[in-house]
Image (cartoon, grey):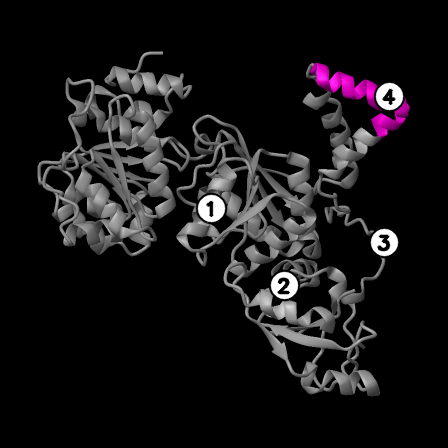
Amino acid sequence: MTFPLTSPLLARALKERNYNDLTPVQSAVLTPEAAGRDILVSAQTGSGKTVAFGLAMASTLLGDAETLPPAGIPLALVIAPTRELAQQVQRELEWLYGYAQARVVACVGGMNPHFERRQLADGGHIVVGTPGRLRDHIERGALNASSLKVVALDEADEMLDMGFREDLEFILEATPAERRTLLFSATMPKSIAALARRYQQNPLRIEVEGGESGHADIEYRAIRVAPNEIELAVVNLLRFTEAPTAIVFCNTRESVRHLHATLIERGFAAVLLSGELSQHERNQSMQALRDGRARVCVATDVAARGIDLPNLGLVIHAELPSDAETLQHRSGRTGRAGRKGVSVLLASASRRRRLEILLKEAGVRAIWGGPPTADEIRKLDQERLLKDPLLSDAPTEQELALGRLLLKGSTPERLAAALIKLYYSRLPAVEDVCDPGEERQQRSREPRRNDTPSPRNHAPASRFPEASVWFKLDIGRKKNADPKWLLPMLCRKGDIKRQDIGAIRIFEHETQFEVAQSVADRFRANIARPGGEPIKIERLKSPSGQTHERRHAAGRSSPGRKGKEKP
């Protein structure tokens, strides 16, 4: 395919990235009417806007030349709301302008500003950054904006919502009046229109149709779940879909931490992403997803904008988004630029009405159903095993020789059974979940110890015949504390085994637990190390106001508060 009004070198880069067809917004910025003009674009997230403004600025940057001149004072500036989006834009522009010999410099909060200043001093054609960091570099004289020919604002509505208006106005005032201004926004509120009137000259208005067309590559599914089985449903959805990469959204940092620990315990290669992480930790999480070391990201809405992951085929809303716009931005992480994706929303009976309203406001239709069952997943596992490349790829001579050696000592049936056992050992266990649908099927379940609170004046006896040491951490029922994820977290952070932890008692704002005395000193030393979960753990002189020795010896009950004991 030929790309009109596009540099041959940019067209070459597009073809190498399999851009056989441009998205509507990319085609719109390459029309003759848009050439050389300011443009005001509204389009859904995931519609290919980054490549669109990269193509739109090409005629201004290159003119009739095929390559850019030697790097010096920047010619183009791209402003994005978040560091993740800015870094993504940098990567996109680097491959798009790679043959045109462009140098793209990123300036974002959370990174070393001295390193960025050195990069700016070395020269660059395009600078991509977040508003606060760009303003800081301009004020310090590190970023020279006097020669900018084009400025692009990506996710302009989000930048205004995040309170960056003053920074944006400062940056735009520092640029030449005759520059081109490309303004891209998912929505077009009055604040964006006002910004366009002030800083654009007779802009061409480009509006890519929303509604169903904006979600054409995303299949929405609404899953009925029991309130106490949301995490189990997430496990089964990840196992059933087996997307190369998936994002699971939660609404709070505590929920992210909780669900991430649960998935790690189940055997998933998962990372977490939330606002409490340092930039280095966020970069590590993103890199693990990009290079395949992890395939599940548990995230807050900090990840909802600006993150583009390869092969992201599944988005799960473990907790419902706050509004229709957040739903669209979360879901827009998949189904990008022609790729298909699935967005799954989990809702208990009490949240169903709210979910129906969200879907209506977002203009999408969802397929309703129950969570994948254990039997459905096991059937899929069998089909996937039979199609596994290990069985279809031609073996090497060395592998055949080893196979003949194994056959001498065992039967084919035993070897096949061993292969099956090895295959299933790699897979996280599936969960038994119910569909609380219209039939309201009742399912018999063994009562769980934690379902019934202990009597008010009864405290669990120590699980150790020897003396133990009690600790407490600053997470309780208010922050979704549960032995399911607390136990593996404590073992990992303290470098001890499950059998080294005794009773776990969960209260409203804290959790108390006992550790075998033989490993208590090692546990204390390990939890004092920096890094890992930002959870405060400290020695407890006595559980619930008593000394452990006195309670253990006399068998007295602890007064006052209820607790939950680890089964």
Mark earlier in primary sequence (4, 1) = 1
Which segment is the magenta one? Answer: 396-417
Is residue 412 in the magenta section? yes
For badge 4, the amino acid type reads Leu
For badge 2, the amino acid type reads Gly
Is residue 434 in the magenta section? no
Label drawn at residue 407: 4
Rendered position, 398 above or below 352: above
Question: 153 or 290: nearer the eye?
Answer: 290
As measured in the structure, the alpha-carbon distance from the residue carrying label 2 to the one carrying label 4 is 44 Å
- Decide if residue 49 is in sight here: no
For badge 1, the amino acid type reads Gln
362 to the left or right of 113: right
Residue 132 percent location from the top left of the image: 26, 53
User: Which numbered mark, 2 or 1, is in the foreground of this view?
Assistant: 2
User: Which numbered mark, 2 or 4, is in the foreground of this view?
Assistant: 4
Element at label 2: helix
For badge 3, the amino acid type reads Ser
Predominant SS along the magenta part: helix
Which quarter of the rendering shows the C terminus? bottom right
Q: Are marks 3 and 4 in contact (CB under 8 Å)?
A: no
As measured in the structure, the alpha-carbon distance from the residue carrying label 4 to the one carrying label 1 is 44 Å
Mark earlier in primary sequence (2, 1) = 1
Label drawn at residue 494: 2
Residue displayed at 77% across by 79% down: 459
Element at label 3: loop
Instruction: Estimate how packed mark 2 is, as few (under 14), some (14 to 19) or many (20 or more) residues with alpha carbons within 10 Å.
Output: many
Residue occupied by mark 3: 444
Mark earlier in primary sequence (2, 4) = 4
